[in-house]
Amino acid sequence: MFNKRTKIGELLSSEPDNREVTVMGWVRTFRNNQFIALNDGSTNENLQVVLELGKFDDELLKRLTTSASVRAVGNLIPSLGRGQRSELKATAIEVLGDSDGEKYPLQPKKHSLEFLREQAHLRFRTNTFGSVFRVRHALAYAVHRFFNEKGFVYLHTPVITASDAEGAGETFKVTTLPFDATPRNEDGTVDFREDFFGRATNLTVSGQLEGELAAMAFSEIYTFGPTFRAENSNTARHLAEFWMIEPEMAFYDLEDNVDLAEEFIRYIIRYAIENNVQDLEFLAQRLADEEKQLPQDKRSEFGLMEKLSFVVDNRFERLTYTEAISILRESNYNKKKKFQYLIDQWGVDLQSEHERFLVERHFKRPVVLTDYPKNIKAFYMRQNDDGKTVAAMDILAPGIGEIVGGSQREERMDKLVSRMQEMHIPVKEMWWYLDTRRFGTVPHAGFGLGFERMVQFVTGMSNIRDVIAFPRTPKNAEF
Ligand code: 4AD
Ligand code: MG
């Protein structure tokens, strides 16, 4: 058996009682032919492995370069040096995999996040990305734990579909048709009957519609999977492939929906604070250092840990779109033309500068906006009695903007069909969706949380490309 080892995270939180242990990991640094800083990804803390001078031969010592992989056996003793509680007094060292330290792209110094994005296959081995991805893992686990505790069924919705759930036309096509000899209909359009599925298909933009079908049987379900959007947005908050969590609940109205979303967000943040404090403190320090480079007025008022505790302990501000518009219209930012897009009339979509104004300057806390104009929202949202708005909700987070989008769904067949017709959604093709309204329809609601935006919020990373392992963005699909 090869895997007879103790993880470094576990060792460092145990008593240094001289017991013999085996560790394996990658060399971060090797100093004075004596001290290996060894890391195995279980924590950012390195284990100091001490090699007694003269005890190991020179050929071996030369191979202990940064990023070489090593197996070390020794005794865990209280550290003689400062900076760590315990260290490993090595009795045997074996190099598992050599690494040319000169050629290794990550030298033991600070690299920019931009540079590390180009080395995404290696960046897991840095402290920053070690912490980010352990926190991402914890949040993902907390998502499942939350819904499991509430009795929700985890539904795997298809990645390939024939519908565009959001109706925004931002789908990636899926086809096996040859590009050079596409079969054509008489009118020149592509004949998808010849295609793999016998029809036009695309990667899903959302699992919601399928989620609604299952909610009409299990009452409460959630999805957690990858979704794809071919929107050409080169921003720090958009990915072409991102992970979304979409709960869908029968017998919920809009208020029930917002309550659940708030409880959910608090729960997963609290889980990360309780289980990943070391990583979060590291990231908080990283963020504080990064912000020191910014002019005073661009720095945040609170550190990362304070910001997270604040969200866990305080209710989100709830208001309608209409109320938000009047706050924005009356704001100094609008009057002094500090917004790029000035707010002059009801009905416009909010830009991220407006969302950030509300969250970061006006309310200084997460904000839930409800009851948006129907013309800027999807066809499935429940129409309010005013004839102008729908029972939609967006949650806006400091530093991020929209983190959740959701709504109560239109459960009334006639209203749904007429809205679909108005918005040119193919009613006939969506017979299966409409069947839920035909056979035992109920008030129901749901929302989608953008997982990467959540990870950004919790880790304080300012670019979404730094919280997903291998980001997919316009003109970029490396790795
Ligand atoms: O607001 P959206 O488009 O809502 C839906 O897809 C609904 N079907 C959700 C539902 O009600 N079940 O997307 C939901 C969330 C956004 O609030 C945002 O956090 C995230 O998904 N999101 C993105 N994240 C990263 N990159 C993108 N291109 C994103 N587009 C949306
Ligand atoms: Mg949205």
Image (tube, rainbow, N blue to C red):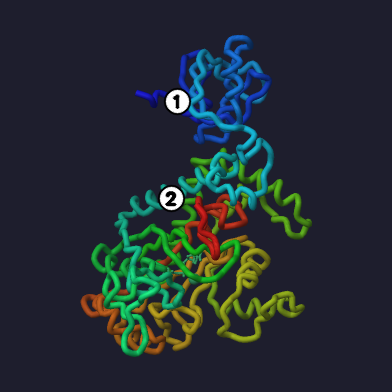
x and y, in percent, of residue 244 in the image: 43, 61
Type of amino acid under label 1: Thr
Residue 206 shows in this picture: yes
Q: What element carries label 2?
A: helix
| Residue shown at the point (31%, 84%) measured from the top left | 427
| Residue shown at the point (56%, 39%) measured from the top left | 125
Q: Splitting the image into 4 quarters, where does residue 384 fall?
A: bottom left
Q: How far apart, in angstroms, are the residues tagged by discs 2 and 1?
A: 25 Å
Residue lying farthest right?
295
Which of the two labelled residues, at mark 2 and mark 1, occupies the earlier sequence position? 1
Task: Classify residue 330 as left or right of residue 218.
Answer: right
Compared to 264, does 127 lie above or below? above
Which label sits on residue 6? Answer: 1
Q: What element carries label 1?
A: loop
- Residue with the mark numbered 2: 140
162 or 290, nearer to the observer: 162
**Disc 1 CB within 8 Å of nearest ligand 1 atom:** no
Type of amino acid under label 2: Ala
| Residue shown at the point (63%, 11%) measured from the top left | 53
Residue 309 shows in this picture: no
x and y, in percent, of residue 6 in the image: 45, 25
Task: Classify residue 448 as left or right of residue 327.
Answer: left
CB within 8 Å, label 2 to label 1: no
Q: How many labels does the image show?
A: 2
| Residue shown at the point (31%, 68%) measured from the top left | 210
324 or 418, nearer to the observer: 418
